[in-house]
Amino acid sequence: MNADEGSAARQADEFGWVGRIAEGDGQAETEFVRRYERGVRALVRRYCRPGDPAVEDLTQDVLAGVLERLRAGAIREPAALPAYIQATILRATSAEYRGRRNEVAISAANELRDGADPADGAVASQRHGLLRALMQTLPVARDREVLARFYLDEQDRDDVCRDLGIDAAHFRRVLFRARERFRELLLAAGLHEI
């Protein structure tokens, strides 16, 4: 056996599972995932923003997509597999961020279409953050929970009562006392106009 034949034999052994995947071999699919999952995750992480929780989902999507192509026999040259995987990662991550940009743009366009002033939205967002931060300084945890869930998160009164163990008939008094304590905090912070 000459050097070229030996190289071809090693390559056939190394990528033999590619053909077996096309034949429906589940063990070959497991071998593919075992062999490539770590590298795919590393490349996805490289193309994503730091700490993005979508890394795991994108990794699984890429592996599933490549497996689907392998099952269909669409990838015939095993040596081309790494480049195909890298191109798939690039397409998947680009599509993810393009989709996010589109969602933000659509949301902003809807707000503008509805006559909302972008500056008002920014002010409201800052006000919401300030109120939430100030609310966290309330000494009574139940006050923080009731106010945040009912006013900021706009949860249903019955859900808040059930989750916090408050009798529905008693809810108004709990809410009133929490609002009064929060109002005192606002006044102390000089935010009576908020």
Image: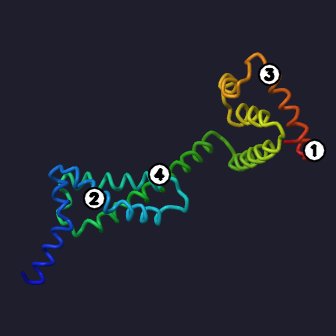
Q: Is residue 138 left or right of residue 68?
A: right
User: Does 87 sit above or below residue 119?
Assistant: below
How is colour applied across the structure in the image? rainbow
Along the line of sight, the residue nearer the viewer: 127 or 83: 83
Label located before the other in sequence (2 or 1): 2
On screen, residue 158 above or below 183: above
Q: Which residue is mark 3?
A: 172
**Of helix, strand and loop, which one carries label 3?**
helix
Residue that badge 4 annotates = 99
Q: What amino acid does circle 1 point to? A: Ala
Residue 188, label in figure: 1
SS label for mark 1: helix
Label 3 is placed on what type of residue?
Arg
N-terminal of the two: label 2 or label 4?
Answer: 2
As displayed, is residue 35 above or below residue 116?
Answer: below
Q: CA distance from mark 2 to mark 3?
A: 60 Å
CA gap, disc 2 and disc 1 = 63 Å
Query: In front of the other: label 4 or label 3?
Result: 3
Residue at (68%, 36%) from the top-left corner?
153
Q: What residue is pinned by disc 2? A: 32
